[in-house]
Image (cartoon, rainbow, N blue to C red):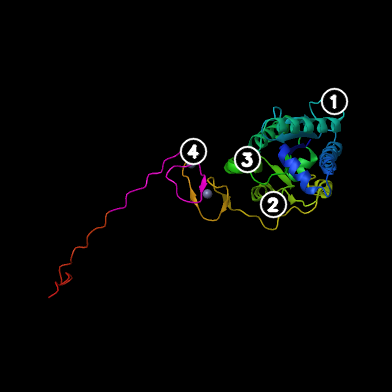
Amino acid sequence: MTSLAVLVDGSSCAWGAYAEKMSERPGQEKTVLASVMRAIVAFSNVHLSLAQSNQLLLYAYANGITKKLLYDSAHSENPDSSACIIEGLRSALRQNSSSGDTRKCAVLAATLATSLCQIRKASMKTTKTSKEAQATGQKGRVVIISFLPDFGSQHSLLMNLFFSAHKHDISIDVVSLGGPSALLQQAADITAGVFEAIQRVDELPRVLMTRCLPVSIRTDTTLSTVDYRAACVCHETLVSNGWTCSVCLAVLCAFQPICPSCGAVFKIAALPRRKRKRPTEVGAAPSPKA
Ligand SMILES: [Zn+2]
Ligand SMILES: [Zn+2]
């Protein structure tokens, strides 16, 4: 059995902005949104059809969504997975749009943590490991379909989750519709997953089917270059050199007396007094000027 968690960005603002950007003429936004939904449904169904015991967990991450787990194939009573997925996504977007959330950064950490726990729980339940798990050493997979490349102040939380996923042999594949994201690229690299930033909506089904399927059947997964710079917590920009809080390991681009992340107060140590040079006995004393 393989558990796959599909995490979809549930920000209605991001979906709307993407549809507007991708539509060639006014009124075509609906078609763009339908294409994204169709691709997610098709990919989910392919995973379920690969093995009878495969589990699919569909999550939406955004503010204002009451139920983030939209579909769980192991516990769903409805046999029509496509209808459940579409209805779940629609209700998540509806809830987010009525919540008044206009943030331009995604809230991924909590949902990713829940999905990792669910995958781990499912892998512990199965007594015999599947052929795929034996062959690849993987216990589960996460596929993130992202619209917003910015994750605000969640950098350190997400990094901890990526390392945790790697420790538990869970790979994270990312399909970014909103452009390149250094943090998600790091997620894929740490967990031996795939990162793909796609330019056109019609590329989404192809990328999902060929790049995000189980490792045993997909093509090359190595990433050429990964930007490993950390984002500072004060401005959320990538920095090459910075200060690190000794308490919470938050990265700061400039020295601040109080850590903005955990509130730790840094004491500036007093500089040691300079010792006066004593004149040595043999003729080292400076001679007074005449
Ligand atoms: Zn900064
Ligand atoms: Zn701190």
Q: Amino acid at mark 1?
A: Asn
Viewer can see residue 92: yes
Disc number lying in front (1 or 4):
4
Cβ of disc 1 within 8 Å of ligand 2? Answer: no
Q: Earlier in the sequence, mark 2 or mark 1?
A: 1
178 vs 82, nearest the viewer: 178
Quadrant where the image shows the C terminus = bottom left
Q: CA distance from mark 1 to mark 3?
A: 32 Å
Disc number lying in front (2 or 1):
2
- Mark 2 burial class by Cα count in 10 Å: few <14, some 14-19, many 20+: some
33 vs 202, nearest the viewer: 33
Q: Amino acid at mark 3?
A: Leu
**Residue 252: in magenta span:** yes
Quadrant where the image shows the N terminus = top right
- Mark 3 burial class by Cα count in 10 Å: few <14, some 14-19, many 20+: some
Q: Earlier in the sequence, mark 1 or mark 4?
A: 1
Q: Amino acid at mark 2?
A: Pro
Disc 3 vs disc 4: Cβ atoms closer than 8 Å?
no
Q: Which residue is mark 1?
A: 78
141 vs 82, nearest the viewer: 82
Whether residue 160 sits left or right of residue 207 in the image: it is left
Cβ of disc 4 within 8 Å of ligand 2? Answer: yes
- Mark 4 burial class by Cα count in 10 Å: few <14, some 14-19, many 20+: few
What secondary structure is the magenta-colored segment mainly? loop
Disc number lying in front (3 or 4):
4
Q: Which residue is mark 2?
A: 180
Which contiguous range is marked in magenta?
248-272
Q: Earlier in the sequence, mark 4 or mark 2?
A: 2
Image x and y of residue 60, in percent? 72, 35
Q: Quadrant of residue 223?
A: bottom right
Q: Which residue is mark 3?
A: 161
